[in-house]
């Protein structure tokens, strides 16, 4: 190999290393530093959706986890699905010990065109599971951020459908998504599946947002009324 080729390869490697910085804390050198990797250890939190479906989230959507998920979803950093999938793995194992079918929440067409991959499906695969795509997007939805619980439920109503040619003899099912906030998306997915005769047992998210946790904290007081 000519010397110039060696030099060019060296330059490319150097450029790659310089470009790499930790998704969690911006420390230069690698995509995820050891300290941030430790912070992605799962700390499962349980809740229920407004429709009463049990939800387990592997992580809180804060700090390191939020930054990593944003880079996976918004910046095409698919390598982060590895460490994030590990966090999901232990949580999925808790819920699917008896071999439930893992059904990812469908990715909207625009998001799939933009990213070229489906985040929930990728996370399930990196968690060692097999995503079974029973659901497909039916229509685009507005950005859920800033919407109330009722507005979110309204926003996702009719947003997904059973994929054509799916037989309804599968199940029981565990739904999987990357981030849960109110659980409105899980409820809509469960409704569509139930209409098709598929039993949904629970839902698992990689991370739960602070809004979701606030709702859970308030839930007992709400129920007492
Ligand atoms: Zn870091």
Image (spheres, rainbow, N blue to C red):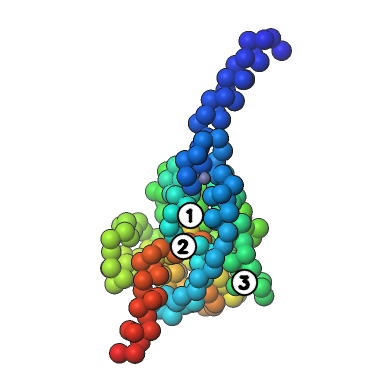
Task: Classify residue 145 as left or right of residue 115.
Answer: left
Q: Residues within 10 Å of mark 3 (few under 14, many from 20)?
A: few
The residue lying toward the viewer, choosing from 194 and 66, is 66
Q: Which residue is mark 1?
A: 65
Query: With respect to residue 219, does 125 lie above or below?
Result: above
Residue 23 image position (x, y, % from top left) = 49, 44
How far apart are the two marked residues, 1 and 3, measured between alpha carbons? 20 Å
**SS at badge 3:** helix
Residue shown at the point (35%, 66%) measured from the top left: 211
Label placed on residue 94: 3
Task: Classify residue 128 as left or right of residue 214.
Answer: right
Quadrant in the rendering for residue 91: bottom right
Residue shown at the point (65%, 58%) measured from the top left: 128
Say whether marks 1 and 2 touch (CB < 8 Å).
yes
How far apart are the two marked residues, 1 and 2, measured between alpha carbons? 7 Å
Figure quadrant of the N terminus: top right
Figure disc tally: 3
Residue 123 image position (x, y, % from top left) = 56, 55
Label placed on residue 161: none
Quadrant in the rendering for residue 218: bottom left
Residue shown at the point (54%, 77%) measured from the top left: 201
Say whether marks 1 and 3 touch (CB < 8 Å).
no
**SS at badge 2:** strand
The answer to whether residue 76 is visible is no
Q: Earlier in the sequence, mark 1 or mark 2?
A: 2
Q: Earlier in the sequence, mark 3 or mark 2?
A: 2
Q: Which residue is mark 2?
A: 60
**SS at badge 1:** helix
Task: Classify residue 99 as left or right of residue 65.
Answer: right
Q: Residues within 10 Å of mark 2 (few under 14, many from 20)?
A: many
């Amino acid at each position: 190999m000519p010397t110039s080729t060696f030099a060019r390869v060296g330059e490319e490697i150097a450029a790659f290393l310089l470009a790499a910085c930790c998704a969690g804390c911006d420390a230069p050198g690698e995509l995820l530093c050891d300290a941030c990797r430790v912070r992605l250890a799962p700390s499962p939190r349980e809740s229920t959706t407004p429709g009463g479906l049990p939800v387990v989230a592997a992580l809180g959507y804060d700090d390191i986890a939020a930054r990593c998920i944003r880079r996976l979803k918004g910046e095409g950093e698919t390598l982060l699905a590895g460490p994030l999938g590990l966090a999901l793995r232990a949580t999925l194992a808790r819920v699917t010990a008896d071999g439930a079918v893992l059904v990812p929440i469908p990715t909207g067409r625009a998001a799939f065109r933009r990213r070229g991959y489906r985040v929930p499906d990728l996370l399930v695969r990196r968690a060692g599971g097999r995503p079974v795509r029973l659901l497909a997007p039916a229509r685009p939805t507005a950005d859920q951020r800033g919407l109330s619980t009722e507005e979110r439920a309204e926003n996702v109503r009719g947003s997904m459908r059973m994929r054509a040619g799916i037989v309804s003899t599968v199940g029981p099912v565990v739904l999987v998504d990357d981030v849960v906030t109110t659980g409105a998306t899980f409820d809509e997915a469960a409704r569509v599946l139930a209409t098709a005769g598929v039993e949904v047992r629970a839902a698992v998210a990689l991370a739960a947002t602070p809004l979701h946790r606030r709702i859970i904290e308030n839930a007992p007081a709400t129920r007492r009324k």
